[in-house]
Each structure stands twice: as structure tokens, then as C-alpha cells.
Image (cartoon, helix red, strand yellow):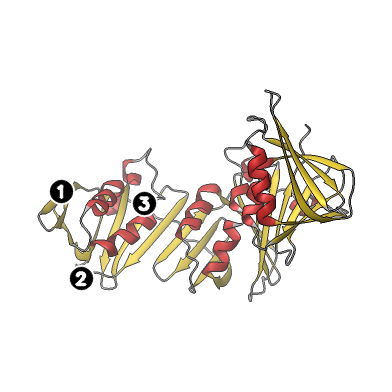
Amino acid sequence: MRFIIQREALLKPLNQVVGVVERRQTLPILANLLVSVGAEGVSFTGTDLELEMVARCAAEGLEAGEVTIPARKLFDIARALPDGCRVDVRQQGERVVVSAGRSRFTLATLPARDFPQVESIEWNERVTLPEATLKDLIDRTAFAMAHQDVRYYLNGALFDLREKVLRCVATDGHRLALCETAIDANATARRQLIIPRKGVTELQRLLDAGDATIDLEFGRNHVRAQRADFTFTSKLIDGRFPDYEAVIPIGADKIVTLNRDEFRSSLQRASILSNEKFRGVRLEVGINRLQIVAHNPEQEEAVEEVEAKSAVDGLAVGFNVNYLLDALAALQSSEVMLCLRDANSSCLLRDVESDRSRHVVMPLRL
């Protein structure tokens, strides 16, 4: 096994794959990458048994073969080498030698036959969509995923495939983020798949906001994303996602329209004096104005007033300021709508121009 490649060309696939490899492993082979050299070029495969990432690139001086190499060490070596150098990677018995200029590194290997392979998967649905669109869906929702929640089905994002629409939904029980996009494919049946948190964050890291398209394939227990230079496969969380549509407030008829940037800046300033534990702020809605009030145990107070379009008067609701700020960061239009019902109900945040992205935040008792 041998290939010769520019340092920058090697660094890109290694960077794509290394995130999947866990630093602490139960099996030594899982700390390694499977490096396969064939007539088409070089492929690098990393897995933690839940996710599998295969990155491909072109190279010169190809000598076919495959072996597993310590992932983190190979990545650190490539990263530390000088820009523009040519890297020669060749197998010598049970070792791999990485040479570049006057540098030479000898790495231990493990047999390729011991590397775990993803089971054969039957793919039921396939959707092709712009890569930038998929990245946008994940960017607008992933922040609301739960982290190590006992309700394991919340520790990921829901991909809800329905007729002509793909939705991405995440919730941690205190807030919910939803974003949808139209798709050309017509799903044969509605499918709901929960991708685990690590799978979502790795996919988010891989995607670019360019013009390329990406293929999403859905199986019974797996999802796969494919681009020309990589194939990403993730197991799904076996659980039932909550009925998220029931959480979106109905009858939230008290509408407050705000300049997004002004509202966001005011919340950030008020948050400085909010309670460090609960992060609560009170929104007091009046005719064409919104007041943001924050208190803390030291009896300090912040008051911010924002211009708003509102016919509501005398409504005060408490929220976690971080949840409001996260939702505003995921919205994109210059003006946003705050849809409220009463002091004990969730609020719905959305762009004025479009409802494809919606955010629900539970109220906080202050």
C-alpha cells in the first residue's frame, strides 16, 4: 500500500473523518482509520460503531492495498507538516512510514480485516437536495437538541420526511426548533427518523454552503448522506419522538413585531444582570413597545425598552434569555414576530417574511 499526496489534499479527508473517531476507545482498532488505496484513489474510513465516515481523495504513485493507521496521530502529523509539501505514505511490513521532505514518521498498524464494517443496509427512501439547504435545516435547529437527557429520543434531531417536504426538528423539553424545506421527491410514506446528537453535529461540520447537491438515503435503522468526496452513515435512535406539532402554540394571537437585531442586542444587555442560574428575563408588552426586565439575587436590575408593532397591552411573560437569543440567532429576516397567548403559555418566534423556521420557548416563572 502506497500513495503520494499534497499535504493540503491529505488534510481535508483526514479532517472530515477524524471527528467520528472517539478519543477513548473500548476496542483499539476503533482509534484507527482504515486506509484503502485502489485505482480510483485513496479512501479513509473512521467509525465508532454508531457512525461511519468514508472520505475519498485523488493521489499519485498508487500501490493498491489497505491497512489501519492511528487516526489522531496521522491527522496531527499532517497538520504539523509545512504548507505545500508532498507526503509519501507507504506500508512496510506491519508499519506505515509517512515521509515529507526531511521528516519521517513510522506508525504502528492493525490489520484491515479486523476493522468493523457497516452491515448491509436496505435503503427505503432517497432525497436529493442542495447541500446548502440541508446545512441550513441543521444550523437552524441543532442548538435545541437535548444533551444526555434521560429521554434518550431527545438527544438528537428528528428528520420528518413527508409529501414534498423535509422537516428538521429538535427539542430539549424547554424549547423547540423547527425548520422545513420543499423537496422534489415524493415520499412513498411519511417517515420519522431520529439522528443522534453526534451524527447531527458531525454532519453539520461536514456540510458546506456551496452549490453542490447531496443525497440523503433513509433505511430502517440508518441514514446516509453522500457527496462525491464522502459517504456518511449514522445509526438512528430507536425511539418515538414527541408529537412536536402539538407543542406549537395554537391561538397565540397577541402578536409583537420587532427588529431582530435591536431585540437581540437589548436581550444581550439585559442578560448581564439576569440570575446566573435561571437566566430569566421578563418581557412586558405594551402598545407599540416591549420592555425587557432582568433581576438577580443581588437586587440589581436591568431595564431595556424596544420599539415594537403591537396592539397588546399589559401582558408580562418570563423566559430563559439564552433560549430567546438562540432562537433569534437561527432566524434570518430583519423583522421577527413574537406570538404570545398569556403569561403561562409558550411563545412562538418566527420570521415575518416566512414561517419555514419556527421556534417555541416555554415560559419561566419569575
User: How many labels, in total?
Assistant: 3
N-term mark: 1 or 2: 2
Can you identify the residue that label 2 sits on? 60
Quadrant of the frame with the N terminus: bottom left
Instruction: Give 249 or 225, whichever is nearer the viewer.
Output: 249
Crowd band around label 2 with a 10 angstrom C-alpha radius: few (<14), some (14–19), many (20+): few
Q: Nearer the N terminus, badge 3 or badge 2?
A: 3
The image shows residue 298 at horizontal and vertical percentages of: 67, 23
Q: CA distance from mark 1 to mark 2?
A: 20 Å
Which image quarter: residue 186? Answer: bottom right
Find disc 3 in the rendering and name its residue: 18
SS at badge 2: strand
Above or below, 242 relative to 57:
above
Q: Residues within 10 Å of mark 1 (few under 14, many from 20)?
A: some
For the C terminus, give its image quadrant: top right
The amino acid type, in three-letter code, at marker 2 is Glu
Q: Describe residue 263's horizontal placement relative to residue 35 as left or right.
A: right
Q: Which residue is mark 1?
A: 106
Circles 1 and 3, Cβ within 8 Å, touching? The answer is no
In x, y percent, where is residue 123? 55, 66
- Looking at marks 1 and 3 on the same chain, the residue that comes earlier in the sequence is marked by 3
Is residue 159 or residue 312 the one in the foreground?
312
Three-letter amino acid code of the residue under disc 1: Thr
